[in-house]
Amino acid sequence: MKIQTSRFGMLDVSDDTLLTFPCGLIGFPAFRRFVVLDPPEDADYQWFQSVDEPSLAFVTMNVHLLQPDFRTRLSEEGLAELDMTSTDSISIMVLVTIPSEQPDQATVNLRAPLVVNERTRHGKQLILHESIPLRYPLFQDSTQCQTYSGVATEAASV
């Protein structure tokens, strides 16, 4: 399938790489199909590009690169939405915010991760407890680094 993007031009993507978010994302409920694009250079981030809106793309990263012990517990409803079975695995991505004039002040949103069932390619955005940081610094020295090794329970979902 060919998709038009504002950042990368026309792209040819395989149907089996599409991610479907039946409820959309926070603030973007109408856009439900996305593809993850790897940057040309070896990087820890990826682009989360809407298939249906050329200008809608987010920078994301695997939460475990930043917080290796990050875990979340999905509600029964959340498991059903993702069509999860006991043998399925999930990937968890977080959205990155990069201030235009201060890229060294980039943050990730640990409170609203994107969870994807790797088998079905269905995803949902979770809203976790308010004690989880909304703006967790991406760049910080190890003395300031806080880890979240507990299980974050889904408070709501989109």
Image (spheres, rainbow, N blue to C red):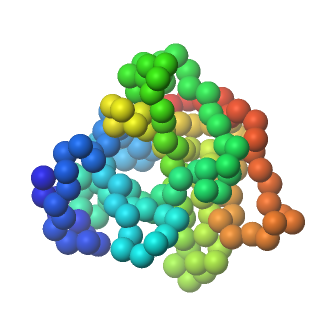
Judged left or right of residue 106, residue 145 is right
For residue 87, above or below residue 62:
above
* Horizontal and vertical percent position of residue 122: 35, 34
Q: Residue furthest right?
A: 143
* Horizontal and vertical percent position of residue 11: 18, 64
Q: Residue furthest top?
A: 76
* Horizontal and vertical percent position of residue 52: 21, 52
Number of callouts in the render?
A: 0
Q: Answer whether residue 43 is visible to the viewer in this image.
A: yes
Instruction: Report the residue at 35% width, 55% height from top.
Output: 36
Q: Answer whether residue 122 is visible to the viewer in this image.
A: no
| Viewer-proximal residue among 38 and 132 | 38
Instruction: Report the residue at 75% width, 69% height from top.
Output: 140
* Horizontal and vertical percent position of residue 72: 62, 33
For residue 106, above or below residue 127:
below
Instruction: Report the residue at 45% width, 27% height from top.
Output: 88
For residue 117, above or below residue 135:
above
Judged left or right of residue 103, residue 54 is left
| Viewer-proximal residue among 53 and 42 | 42
User: Which quadrant holds residue 24?
Assistant: top left
